[in-house]
Image (spheres, coloured by chain):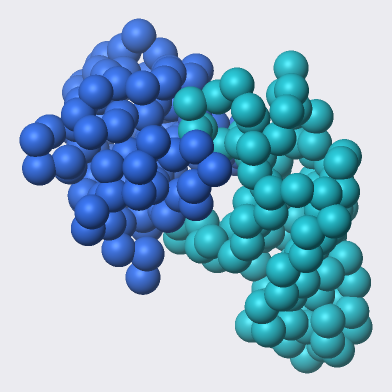
Chain colours: A blue, B cyan
């Protein structure tokens, strides 16, 4: 158990809908990262937050957004869902800014868009 | 462009048959190289971090090594419970901390 929690574990929804994925980092960790894992692309970085502020963006679609709250938990919002958004979404956390630090991953949310 | 290539894509071993997994990387300055293990449907589990060429780390049957262009994960006398996908990731000097992952090596160990 990495100490990172994610909810829900599974999510089934329809195209065009909006969903919210939630992540609680390890106790004391300030950075939260979101990654998407699909069968053909592997793990892809989406976005990073550090102590409530956006720090880095990867290949995140404009339909996707995230935020980190004062209690350091984070939410990833996915809207206008398409079939291709079906994937595993992982949250990871690290102690500080992340530079040179190990990232610990949560169990993931499996999203299926029908 | 920063990238990570892992080989082979899949590896089948008999129990006790030692082997190595390869991770080749191209980055504009390496801040760190990370190995993770991932079981089907689960999140990546941290194994090792390596920071500089020549560094080695060991944990049970696993040993990770790093050169200036690649890293190896050596598995000595593997057991069926070592079956998993092994992921390599790098963090580049110019990044804010995000990891760039390879596509992984799927290891199967048969009894």
* Quadrant position of residue A16: top left
Where is residue B22? Give x, y as percent: 85, 53
- Residue B10 visible, this orientation: no
Q: Residue at x 80, y 36 (%)?
A: B25
Where is residue B46? Give x, y as percent: 53, 61
Q: How many marks?
A: 0
- Residue B6 visible, this orientation: yes
Instruction: From this view, report whether residue B93 is shown above or below residue B20.
Output: above
Instruction: From this view, report whether residue B52 is shown above or below residue B101.
Output: below
Where is residue B85? Give x, y as percent: 66, 60
In the foreground, B78 or B49: B49
Instruction: From this view, report whether residue B60 is shown above or below residue A2.
Output: below
Instruction: Locate the N terminus of chain A by quadrant.
Output: bottom left
In the foreground, A99 or A83: A99
Residue at far left of view: A70
In the foreground, A68 or B13: A68
Q: Residue at x 27, y 42 (%)?
A: A30
Q: Residue at x 87, y 39 (%)?
A: B69
Q: From the viewer's perspective, is B56 left or right of B36?
A: right
Q: From the viewer's perspective, is B52 left or right of A41?
A: right
Q: Residue at x 39, y 26 (%)?
A: A47
């Amino acid at each position: 158990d990495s100490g990172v929690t994610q909810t829900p574990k599974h999510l089934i929804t329809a195209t065009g809908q909006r969903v919210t994925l939630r992540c609680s980092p390890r106790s004391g960790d300030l950075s939260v990262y979101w990654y998407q894992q699909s069968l053909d692309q592997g793990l892809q970085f989406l976005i990073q937050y550090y102590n409530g502020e956006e720090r880095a963006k990867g290949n995140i679609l404009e339909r996707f957004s995230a935020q980190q709250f004062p209690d350091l938990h984070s939410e990833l919002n996915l809207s206008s869902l398409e079939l291709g958004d079906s994937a595993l979404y992982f949250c990871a956390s690290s102690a500080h800014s992340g530079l040179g630090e190990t990232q610990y991953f949560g169990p993931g949310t499996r999203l299926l868009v029908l | 462009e920063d990238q990570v290539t892992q080989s082979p894509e899949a590896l089948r071993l008999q129990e006790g048959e030692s082997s190595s997994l390869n991770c080749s990387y191209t980055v504009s300055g390496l801040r760190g190289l990370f190995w993770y293990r991932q079981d089907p449907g689960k999140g990546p589990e941290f194994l090792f971090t390596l920071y500089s060429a020549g560094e080695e780390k060991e944990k049970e049957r696993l040993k990770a090594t790093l050169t200036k262009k690649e890293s190896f994960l050596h598995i000595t006398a593997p057991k069926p419970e070592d079956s998993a996908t092994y992921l390599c990731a790098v963090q580049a000097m110019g990044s804010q901390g995000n990891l760039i992952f390879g596509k992984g090596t799927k290891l199967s160990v048969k009894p």
